[in-house]
Image (cartoon, helix red, strand yellow):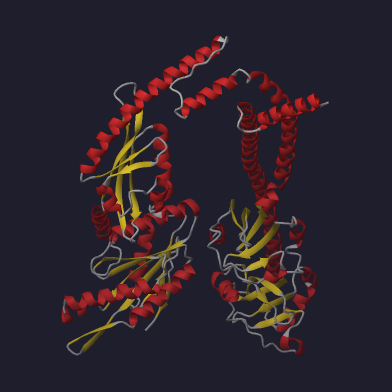
Amino acid sequence: MSRMHSTAKQNGARWWGWLSARSLRGRLVLGLAFTWVLLVAVVLAMAWHLGKNMVQETSLSHLRYETGMLADEITHQVQSRTTALEHVAEIAEGLTSRESLQRRLEHNNALLEWFERLIVTGPEGRVKASWPLIGAAADGGNSLDIADRAYFRMIKGTRHAHVSEPFIGRASRIPMVLIGVPRWDANGDFAGIVGGAMSLRSSGLFARLARQQGGNGSYVSIFTASGKLLYHPDRDQIMSRITDVSANPNLPLAMSGWEGDAVGKLFSGQPGLQSYAQVWPAGWVVGRFMTLDQAQLPLADFIQRLWWIWVLMALWMMPLLWWVLGRMLKVLQHLETQIGEVGHGRRESIDLTSDVDEFQEIATTFNAVEAERKTLLTSLQEREAFLNAILDATPLGMFVADFDGEFTYMNPALLQVLGLASTTTTSQWLEYVHPDDRDGTHDMWRHSLATNNEFLRQLRFVRPDGAVLWLEVHARVVMLSRGGFSLGFVGTMKDITQRREDEALARWEAEHDPLTGLLNRRGFDRRLGEAFAEFQKTSTPSALLLFDLDHFKPINDEGGHALGDEMLRRIGQIVAWEVRRSDHVARQGGDEFAVLLPSCTLSQAEKIADSLRLAVSDISVASEGREYHVTLSLGVTTFSDSDQTVEEALSRADAASYEAKARGRNAVVVSLPDDNDHTAMLFD
């Protein structure tokens, strides 16, 4: 009994030794297990990555289809309602009395299925008939005047149907929009509008949208080009305005007329898929959104099931692998021990006694490699000592890096330029590279290490004391004369800060007017060409203002050129202050100025032009007791699809500026593309 207990104890100790990581058998088993897990992880990661892209593409295609269908349906709804109102306007043509208009509205009672209320106005904007009756109209009178409403002015000015911005109904207190169409009298003159107010909740306009809400993380939203929400699953957000678009650059593009799909942050800040389509008759945007978690949920379930299958397979294979390795590694245990002793310096070579020829060949080959390694190590140490002596003496900043890209040496001249300690590692050194240059520098450095190509790059470096330097880094592989073996990278760093500053100043001076600091003609023409190319590619609207100064010549003639230059400087400051930060202001020569307004509609450009006119009219300079003022004659236009070159838009704006001056100066004249009649705003 005692002998059996002793034998069992010895077997248990042997098994525990094999299981431990100190044995070659245990290490191989652990290594193969780790390799298996790593392989599974890599395969699953690749499956996840490829599947994620496929899921995203499929989901985006589905969102694109749904968004287009929704936009088409809402467009059809808006056009149907607009057609119905135009029909009412046709049958009401020639009617002038309130009673006849009221009867005509009441005969179209079926339209109340679409509209909360119908109205008919006169040419001056006063409501002449409504159904159901509103305000004083219920008592036989009319007191409602909508002449100041933006939609009335738009319809009256354009003579076309128009959909208003959303508003809260006075009586119902619910969100509404109004579709209005012009009506005409017997002579074909503008006689007012026929309008229909629609509830954003109960008019049936967005009836299908509730069925498109996919639940968790999937929803539809509709908003105006100005960023006001018309429909959202959270009803509390309806009528709110989209103010923060910095996290999602696709929102301002969609509000500017872009249609398409992308991956980015949603309203909630979560990453997700998004697709946009335009409801052109109303100026609305349909957005279809889905979070990435929702889109990738089926793929995540599949990957999880696949992972468990691989785990079960690994558990089944481990006992078999353990048995096979045990058979193979008995002979190698002695070899493992001697290799460890050589590695720790306790032996000079392997002395393996075995009747297996292959193991004898392994021992012989290992001994030969060890001897060659010692020879190469001695040669390398000598070369490093020689190189370090040269690098310490040179005044040029130099460094040495190993195969892994880690700095092994930086000479005193380089440490002085960078303000770093000699113990600084590569990872620490990269932290001082400017954030805008860090990723590109790291990627290019890794590429040079992998391909043995030279590294040449200019980058910004932030010293520990806060000073920013421009460095030119040049590194190349150093090769041994025998065998073509590379030792590592040797490179130089030059401080080129002054050279970069001189180049930047030269570029600035080439495109800016020295008197006002504004763009000169060359700089303005380049930005104008870029804006026109963007318009041709994406139809992004841009406006152009040209103007010169009225009554400027007397300032130069009577007060002198110094006084005229002072007036030009003040005008340049005021104009640059009044426009948006994204706009480009230029002095093209003499008293001629130009302003480019990217992503700007014609109505916005008119307001900006008038604000410039008012601001400049307040500027004055004085000389010898006399005060001088100037005014502006401004020409305004926008890019047109019919423009073949940017010079056509410049010609329109220039002609409008001359017309403003011909009409008495101190005026804004708008030149519409393909229109010989110019719209002017004249002021005293």
Position above or below: 74 against 666: above
Q: Residue furthest front?
A: 2
512 left or right, relative to 431: left
Q: Quick check: can you spot residue 301?
A: yes
Residue drawn at (24%, 87%), measured in percent from left and top? 627
Frontmost residue, 623 versus 307: 307
> In the rendered image of this protein, does residue 402 appear above or below residue 684?
above
Q: Is residue 58 left or right of residue 553?
A: right
Q: Residue at x 26, y 51 (%)?
A: 495
Residue nearer the viewer, 456 or 269: 456
Q: Percent x, y for residue 198? A: 71, 71
Relative to 88, residue 465 above or below: above
Question: Relative to 317, is 478 on the left or the right?
Answer: left
- The one nearer the camera, 353 or 549, is 353
Any part of residue 647 in sight: no
Outermost residue, right side: 1
In the image, is residue 188 above or below residue 428? below
Kindly indicate the quadrant of the structure image that contains residue 462: bottom left
The image position of residue 65, as x and y in percent, is: 67, 49
Question: How many numbered markers are drawn?
Answer: 0
Image quarter of the N terminus: top right
Return the x and y of residue 168 as percentages of the image width and height. Answer: 68, 77
On the image, the x and y values in percent for residue 550 come to 28, 77
User: Which quarter of the rendered picture does the C terminus lie within?
Assistant: bottom left
